Every structure is written in C-alpha cells, then in structure tokens.
Image: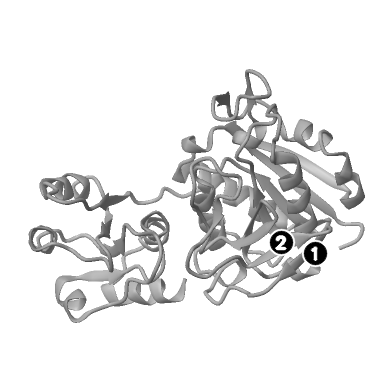
Amino acid sequence: MKGTKIMMIGTGGTIAGTGNGASALTEYRAGSIGVDDLMQAVPALEEYGPFESMQFSNIDSSEMSPYRWGHLALLVNEVAERDDIGGIVITHGTDTMEETAYFLQLTVNTKKPVVMTGSMRPATALSADGPVNLLQAVQVARSENAWNQGVLVVMNGYIDSAREVAKLHTTDVATFGNAQLGHMGCVQNGQAYFYYTPCRKHTSDSEFVLREEVEFPAVGIVNLYGGMDTEILNMVASRSQGLVIGGFGHGTLPQGVRDTLKKIAIPKVRSSRIGNGIVSSNSSDVKEGFIVSDSLSPVKARILLMLALQQERSREELERIFATY
C-alpha cells in the first residue's frame, strides 16, 4: 500500500457541520465544510498520505436516497478500479450511515478498504469527535488487515461491519455498534485490530454490483404498533414493489395484519422492529408468502430487497438472497 493514494470522498454530515459557538452540540448546520478543509484540520493525516479528494455532496445525511446511493456506488467502483488507489475513506452523516454502508457493501466490487466515518458533534464544537474519527478511518484504510473485509464503519475508536452496524443513541459519541455481535475490531495507537471477519457475501463477491445508473424499485417499510389500522399496509403496498414489515418481537404479526398481508401480492419480508436478534422462518411463512430478514434490521432488509427486485424473482430465490447476504 505504500505509495498508493487514499481517496477521500466527502458527502457532508455533522462531521462537516458548523454551529453557533463551541457549546452548540445539537443545533448546527450539517454539510457546511468541504472534505479538503476537514483534512487540513487534522495535521496528523500527513503521515498516512498521499491523498486525493472528491466532494460527492455536502448534505445532511437525512437527505440520502437510493438515487444518491446509486451514484455514490458508481463513483466508488470507478475510484476502486484505479491502480494508484489503495483505499477509500468516505465522510458521511450518522443518521443514515448504516444504510449507505450496507448499500455500498452490496454494490461495490473491490477488495480494497472502503471505510466510512463521521461524527456526532459538529466541527465547531468544543469536543468535536470528527478529527480523531477521520484520522482513525485513514489508519484503518492503510491497514493490510482491512483488505477484503467489506465496507467498514470507523467511529469512536471502533471498527464495525456495514451489515451489522447501527446507530444506537441519538447524541452519544459512542453510538455506533450492535448489541448482538459486538464490534469487529478497534483502533489503538494508530493500529487497526480485527477480531472477526464478515461471513456473509459482500463487495467483490456480491451479485448486485452497480456498473451503470439504474432506477431502483420502491420498497416500503411499515413498523407495527399496538392497535395499528391495517389499511396503512395497503396504502404503503399500493406505492411499492416490495414491502418490509417491522413486526413485534420475533417478527410477530397480529392476525389482522396477517389477514391483510395475505391479500398483498408483492414480495413481503418479515422483520422485527426490535433491531437486534434473528427473525427465523416458521411453517406459516411459506404458506403466507413471507421472506424472513434473518438478522437484518427493517432499513437494511429494505435495501437488500430493493436490490434483489431489480429483476423478477421467486420467493425461493429471495429466500436464498436473504440467507446469503
């Protein structure tokens, strides 16, 4: 990796945000600073160069969408094919980082490190976490151990896999991780330490790699709540080509919800609103036409279903995909 460049891609987010004073931790303007300025604020990065940079966007990550994800994946694929690029670091807002990371995990064809990072506090905050997160993301991207690990999220000194990572707290700098499997590794004294590797297919082994701009099918999510009007299911399904249901507990569906879903012919994924644990198949799933999400959260199940439905697939084929990715 020596002599090869790290490509820095800026998309915006809190890490590029500015507030009205050093004490403004939650009220700020995301996407106010360019990626070059972020890099200049961390002199220690010089040790890990050379670098090249691109400003893909400068937005609050709540504005991310399948359209933007698709274009970002095309850019990352283009950059990763260059012989002079040894790794890619993407700065991103935290609100949808887990979704962008999983989308790239499935659509980028490379064994080179692709590392995402951001911050929970704006660049102008007294205790801004962006600079150290950026430095540690670059340190991971420079690590030989980061090759062929899929897309990684580096925040607060930890390394997480795109498939499992989630934002677990609204404001804490230690928000990223997962309650089920733990962190993939950590960064200490400039070194990346890995303790497990992804077992599900990703990046260079994925069948969903993007090579050209495509229009993604609409996939809706409905998270259940007590006493829900089941007409909501019909409303969302009427505007969708696939549907993810965030059920109670182990993806539990009340009888009224089941009766409504039986009449909905589009592909349906049974997930859980809990956010941790596995939703495994039961005898009624085949009969009622459900695919189960395995350990994917509803938002990640939506991404996988959206990519899978770029072509017509049987329930059995969709079941294979959810068991593979």
Residue 304 position within the rendered picture, expressed as x and y whole percent measured from the top left: 42, 61
Q: CA distance from mark 1 to mark 2?
A: 8 Å
Q: Locate residue 106 relative to residue 244 in the image: left or right.
A: right
Q: Residues within 10 Å of mark 1 (few under 14, many from 20)?
A: some
Residue 22 position within the rendered picture, expressed as x and y whole percent measured from the top left: 68, 24
Which one is in front, 30 or 181? Answer: 181
Q: Secondary structure at mark 1?
A: loop
Residue at horizontal 33 percent and vertical 75 percent from the top: 319
Q: Are marks 1 and 2 in contact (CB under 8 Å)?
A: yes
**Counting residues from the N terminus, which is met first, the one under dot 1 or under dot 2?**
2
Residue at horizontal 64 percent and vertical 48 percent from the top: 75
Q: Locate residue 63 relative to residue 224 in the image: left or right.
A: right
Q: Residues within 10 Å of mark 2 (few under 14, many from 20)?
A: many
Q: In this orientation, does residue 82 appear?
A: no
The residue under label 1 is 143
Residue at horizontal 35 percent and vertical 60 percent from the top: 309
Residue at horizontal 48 percent and vertical 42 percent from the top: 170
Residue 149 position within the rendered picture, expressed as x and y whole percent measured from the top left: 66, 69
Give residue 113's mark. 2
- Vertical side of 119 occupied by 154: above or below: below
